[in-house]
Image (cartoon, rainbow, N blue to C red):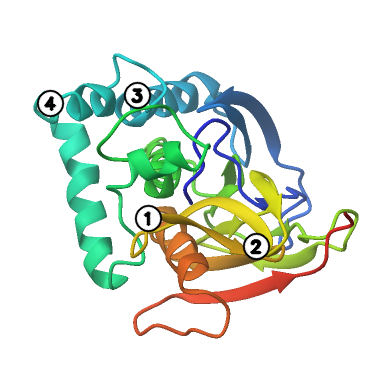
Amino acid sequence: MRILAMLLVGCSALVLTCCKKSDDPRVIEGRAMGTDWRLAYRGDREVRAEVAAEIERWEQVLSQWRADSDLSRFNRGEPASADLQRVLDLAGEFELKTGGAFDAGVLAEVHRAGFGPEGEGVDLSAIGKGFAVDRVGERLRSMGIDHFIFELGGEVLAGEGEWRCGVQSPVPGGEWKKLSISNQAIATSGNYYQYRKSNDGMISHIIDPATGDPIVRPPVSVTVMAEDCATADVWATALFVLGPGVEPEGAPEFFWMSGEVEP
């Protein structure tokens, strides 16, 4: 999802209890990447410091708002760090898989649309947050924490156990779509958090790589469910670009939500 300043999407985890166990999970919260994160997990170990450190590591790699981040230096012409190259390579693979509907090389277009920092080069907003969520999941599992659900600004990754979450309606005050997930990731792209209104619809922060222009349509969102959060993140953006009614080959499971917004 091409969100720059706040890195928000239309999916927010309603972390409740594991459906198969009666004991309540531990819940910790924090803030990073311009948004909030929340972790519910089962285990006696304190993990706040480790989770915060993992997110900070990847924010320093991927942020386009930090002048000294690996990505910002790369966009100024410096060589990519090993960590950044890892994400760049993955982004290139997804560009091929999505037929170009996902394209990280739109930083200038995002700024021209009024949604991002000035500059040219690579914008990893549509993969970076999901990638960071996956790294947190790896870190938790390496510490023996297998039963968890982690959310970073709406990108969600669940470990073992059955966890309930919800996807927000594009309509203010509308009903949330309830989901139950296990060992699965969720990401949503929508146009009702960062947008400008026009006579044709809502001008979104998401760029169509084919035209270089922001997507304009009525309030809508697409939610993707995949094995990992980077995949869900990328495909949510790609599907939003392609639009409702398109079912590209190789896409994970997804669904659309729509509605009218009061003027």
User: Badge 4 is on which residue?
Assistant: 77
Q: Taking 82 as reference, is 67 above or below it?
A: above
Q: Earlier in the sequence, mark 2 or mark 1?
A: 2
Q: Which of 121 and 29 is in front in this view?
A: 121
Which mark is first along the chain, 4 or 2?
Answer: 4
Question: Mark 3 highlights which residue?
Answer: 57
Q: Which mark is nearer the camera, 4 or 3?
A: 4
Q: Distance between the residues labelled 3 and 1?
A: 31 Å
Mark 2 → mark 4, Cα distance in angstroms: 45 Å
Asked if the residues shown at circle 4 and circle 3 are in contact, with their CB atoms under 8 angstroms apart, the answer is no
- Residue type at tag 3: Arg
- Would you name the residue on which mark 1 appears? 212
- Mark with earlier residue (3, 2): 3
Dot 3: what SS?
helix
> Which circle, 3 or 1, is nearer the viewer?
1
Q: Distance between the Cα atoms at labels 3 and 2?
A: 29 Å
Residue at image coords 21%, 35%: 84
Q: Which residue is drawn at 43% across and 42% down?
A: 110
Specify the amino acid type for callout 2.
Glu
Labels 1 and 4 touching (C-beta < 8 A): no
Mark 4 surroundings within 10 Å by alpha-carbon count, few (fewer than 14), some (14 through 19), many (20 or more): few
Q: Residue 162 carries which label?
A: 2
